Image (spheres, rainbow, N blue to C red):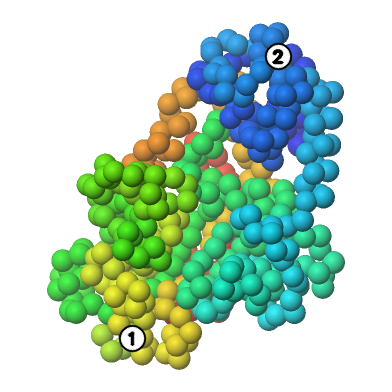
Amino acid sequence: MADSEKKINELFMKDGYEVTSSARGYRVDRLLCQVFDDWSRKDVSLLIKNSGVKVNGESVRKGSKRLKNRDIVLIDQKVFEKVKKTVEKARDAKEFTYYGDEKTIEPENLPLEIVYEENEFIVVNKPAGMVVHPAYKNPSGTLVNAVAGYFKRNKIQLPRRVGLVHRIDKDVSGLLIIAKDDHSLSALSSQFSGVGITGPGIDVSMKARKLYWAVIKPESSSQLESIGLLKKGAKMDTITVEGYIRRSRADRRVSEFNIGRPFLDASIKGSRSRANDANGAANKGRYCLSFMKLVSKLPKGEWLIEVEIITGRTHQIRSQLSSLGIPVVGDKMYGGKENRHNDISMHGIALRSVALDIIPPGVYKECIKERKLAMLLAGKDKKSVDDGAINGKAEKKIHEKPYCNGRIVSQRATRGLECDKFIKKYKSIDREGIEIDRICIANFVIP
């Protein structure tokens, strides 16, 4: 057991944790979910039902209990170990189902291009036209089926969700990360989570960074100048695109994007209609943020544009570019023209996930534990931790220097415009001045 994890366990199970301003106002179950990050709220509720959690010497009956300053939170270690075994046994016994689908994933012997592999995860190159996970119209032949087959051939125990950390659209090509075990899945999923900042000790500098290339075809250079991507003298500039995104009421397959502000018709009757997304967001839409920069001019009036997405909303890049009047080439759903750039476009749209920058799962887990322990003991102001989860502008301030204008591009510039595979391990400095090991896996290929 890591030293920081051991100290956290001792803090809650030996003497009891005295609530400081860093946890004041938290629900008991939420605090414990953040401290023991492999546990879901359902797991914590089982611990509470078994009288395993006490506040000021009294057993907690409901996880919704709010904590006050100087409350003492104590976990019964015997009950904790007993519930932990029950939880792990239930996880092992449960067959993999994706988002409630009762059909068990069938391993299939399908081609799987692995760009990079470690003991904890693999990075695969998904071709355009391949569906990521099984659905009603695509019960087999998906990326998840191919990954399950790879795990079976290599005698790797199937993790939850077949290790699927994130997704990209069927018509989009590029890099995806697959975890090899449950612990790695948890660490990687936290980095890719759409939530900006949640819980004690987590900040945006601990998030994964995702870079995309897209081909666009503007009407003229003056259109790019009006958007801010191009300045006089052919100088390329980085722009920030932020606003709110939601499912279209006219066509549920399409997302609509409103620049800068929520949708004004958010107060219409029936706020729980299908116009809401799967997470129950209001009709005003969900905040989304991207950074965009032109890379180079291509033949036939096309341009290669680089996009870093800070939030990961459905069709975020496609809807944002469409709203700017420069839709992805070949993306007919969002008004894109037919792509004649190359033959690959016949199987998808001219959008590709070209680079993923992450913290290795083991390093991430230890970093999170250290930060949680430090903040639980130091008692930092809770507001400074939670602002990013509530207000997207807090995330924007942290990302004043866009990823698409930083390390990865400078490394690529020394290698030419395209390179098949680029792996870079380096140390990053977070906003607290602490060094963190990171790894960037890139596959710079024009879509």
**Of 394 and 25, which appears nearest the observer?**
25
User: What kind of residue is marked 2?
Assistant: Ser
The answer to whether 407 appears left or right of 177 in the picture is left
Nearer the observer: mark 1 or 2; the answer is 2
Q: Which residue is mark 1?
A: 338
Q: Quadrant of the C terminus?
A: bottom left
> In the rendered view, does 382 fall on the left or right side of 153?
left
User: Can residue 409 be seen at all in this image of the molecule?
Assistant: no
Earlier sequence position, callout 1 versus callout 2: 2
Where residue 231 appears, as percent x and y from the top left, is 18, 67
Q: In this orientation, which residue lies closer to the viewer: 106 or 40?
A: 106
Relative to 403, residue 89 above or below:
above
Q: Quadrant of residue 368?
A: top right
Q: Secondary structure at mark 2?
A: strand
Q: Secondary structure at mark 1?
A: loop
Tell me the quarter of the picture where residue 88 sits: top right
Q: Quadrant of residue 99?
A: bottom right
Q: Residue at x 77, y 47 (%)?
A: 91
Callout 1 amino acid = Glu
Q: Quadrant of the N terminus?
A: top right
Between 406 and 181, the one nearer to me in the picture: 181
Q: Which residue is mark 2?
A: 59
Q: Position of residue 276 (x, y in %)?
A: 39, 50
Q: CA distance from mark 1 to mark 2?
A: 64 Å
134 vs 318, left or right, is right
